[in-house]
Amino acid sequence: MQGAVLLAAMFLMLAAPARASETIINSHGFAEFGALKYAEGFAHFDYVNPAAPKGGEMSFSAVGTFDSMNPFTRKGRAGALASYHLESLMVESYDEPGSYYGLIAESLEYPESQDWVIFNLRPEARFSDGSPVTAEDVVFSHNILLDQGLKSYAEAVRKRIPKAEALDAHRVKFHFSHDFPRRAMITQVGGTPVFSKAWFEADPENRRLDEPRLDPGVGSGPYVLDTFDVNQRITYRRNPDYWGWHLNVNQGRHNYDRIRVEYFGDAIAAMEGFKAGVYTLRTENNSKNWATAYDFDAVSRGDVIKDAIPDGNVPAANGFVMNLLRPVFQDIRVREAVQLAYNFEWTNESLQYGLFRHRSSFWQDTALEAKDLPEGLEKQVLEALGDQIDPAVLNEPAVMAHTSKANRPSDRRNLRRAMMLLDEAGWIVGDDGMRRNAAGEVLKMEFLLDSPVLERIVQPFVSNLQAMGIDAILNRVDFAQYTSRRREKDFDMVSFAYPKSLEPSTGLYQQFGSEAHQYSVFNPAGLADPAVDALIGNIVKATTQEDLYANTRALDRVLRAKRFMVPTWYLDVNWIAYWRMYEYPKALPPFSPGTMDLWWINSETEADLKASGALR
């Protein structure tokens, strides 16, 4: 024992100088892989118009209600853009994935091991009340998110980031746990919103992060809350005293004097509001609207423009998610049968005007998408999982979304296959046409919705489930009830979109990891699987793009084989309609259309529209 202690001591003595002699990197930004595109002291991002005029009002719509201006509340529903007044230490570039540049922080320091990071704050950074942004504010923000933020977030971050400390007024240090990979740790803390410690501590009882409130507090961003009328509208105004107008990362951005959000009770009313000029920019997500609703006079005159702007992002993984915490979905044969009840081809042609493409992959149309049989490094990664995965994952092509006939909502071939699977799973059709298990329990499923737009899409799917003998219902509830039930995982199936990136990392733990699967709102499926956890770990540990891509393809393959989601549709463009006083840079970046912060208002065109009576 004594010898072992001596050896351990000698190891530590040898290891300490190695760490101490590590190269410390000082930089104006951080890239997950490779080098930053923009050198220190760059004038502005390539995709902005640095001469963009300031002024005017950008307006868009929201459907539903809000009862809080605190975006972090665990109760109620926050208003649109409720976090828009907050800033983080770094800001993401729109034309290079996984690259971030200093915002509140002018620079950062970290060792090659990335065991820690120090951010050097800009001394001129100020909150909207004029008080300085300090390292203490950053530490406070980190800690209050752990104490009062989402449980799934707090539990994950506590383990990975054991300590944050203010070294002086403008230097803050984050320490990272040796038990977890370092990748994305720096970008995580660099992207955390910074709150005013003084504002929260002035009234800690009424200024909790997890409680609804109509006072948004103070932030350091370019916009502040101007006015609001609950469930009617919210207006933000550009802060003329914003501290960061001179920064290179802000040149050509944040060009509107005001941003207004108009609330409507439903999507139909919102569309009518746009036609009437109640608001002037609309990001469209309804194919029926895009195909048929833009035939009004303002479009014919050229006063309203329909634009399809290319989207270089990974398409959000849209689909109908099954709650695996429900006993009915424990059997993969039931899950596959549910998938087979959905007819994308008929839905797309008959209800969506043929405008969408069918999604199979969680990383559709990218180098991270699993295809055909696994090979090379991806195959090695899967083989290392051993009996944690179904052998079919290794020996068969990646699971693809099934095809259906487009001439009718039900495809008899697929429904026959689905019913055979249900029979095999022990759900037998009785004399009354309903499926029951050996205990006599009826096979029931509720599809929970809060959107009338989706209702017409989901109803034929539910009808196909019913045709197979399943007691399936579609239940559309109000926004507040839907939000509450989603948080509590009180649903069988919901429509959901998993956001995806070209450089996936720790966020995958929240979406698919076992750690918080029972309550994470980002993991609606409640997925908990050791193979998935292992692959996420590999992704987070990846030090080369080759490792990242191979492990992500392996994860994509395993997730698709789990069949917990009915894959639906996706687009590779952004549908945006706007009144013609909006203008934008000639070369928009691939990873954001930039409507909020890159576009601007042509004041002469706006005046012409108002003078003609086209706009109010």
Image (spheres, rainbow, N blue to C red):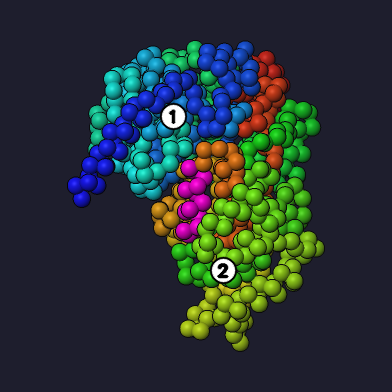
Q: Which residue matches tag 1?
A: 112
Which residue is located at x 51 percent, y 84 percent? 438
Which residue is located at x 36 percent, y 44 percent? 179
Which quarter of the picture shows residue 190? Answer: top left
Q: Which residue matches tag 2?
A: 332
Tell me which label, 1 or 2, sits earlier in the chain: 1
Identified by mark 1, the residue type is: Glu
Which residue is located at x 71 percent, y 69 percent? 414
| Residue nearest the observer in this picture, 452 or 314 | 314
Find the distance from the CA under tag 1 to the CA under tag 2.
44 Å
Mark 2 crowdedness (10 Å alpha carbons): few <14, some 14-19, many ≥20: some
Residue 16 locus on image (x, y percent): 31, 31
Q: Is residue 266 left or right of residue 218?
A: right
Residue 499 within the segment the image draws in magenta? no
| Residue nearest the observer in this picture, 130 or 214 | 130
The stretch of residues the image draws in magenta is: 529-541
Which tag is nearer the camera, tag 1 or tag 2? 1
Residue 531 within the segment the image draws in magenta? yes
Which quarter of the picture shows residue 308? Answer: top right
Q: Quadrant of the C terminus?
A: top right
Identity of the residue furthest to the bottom in this view: 431
Mark 1 crowdedness (10 Å alpha carbons): few <14, some 14-19, many ≥20: few
Residue 613 locus on image (x, y percent): 69, 24
Image disc number at residue 461: none
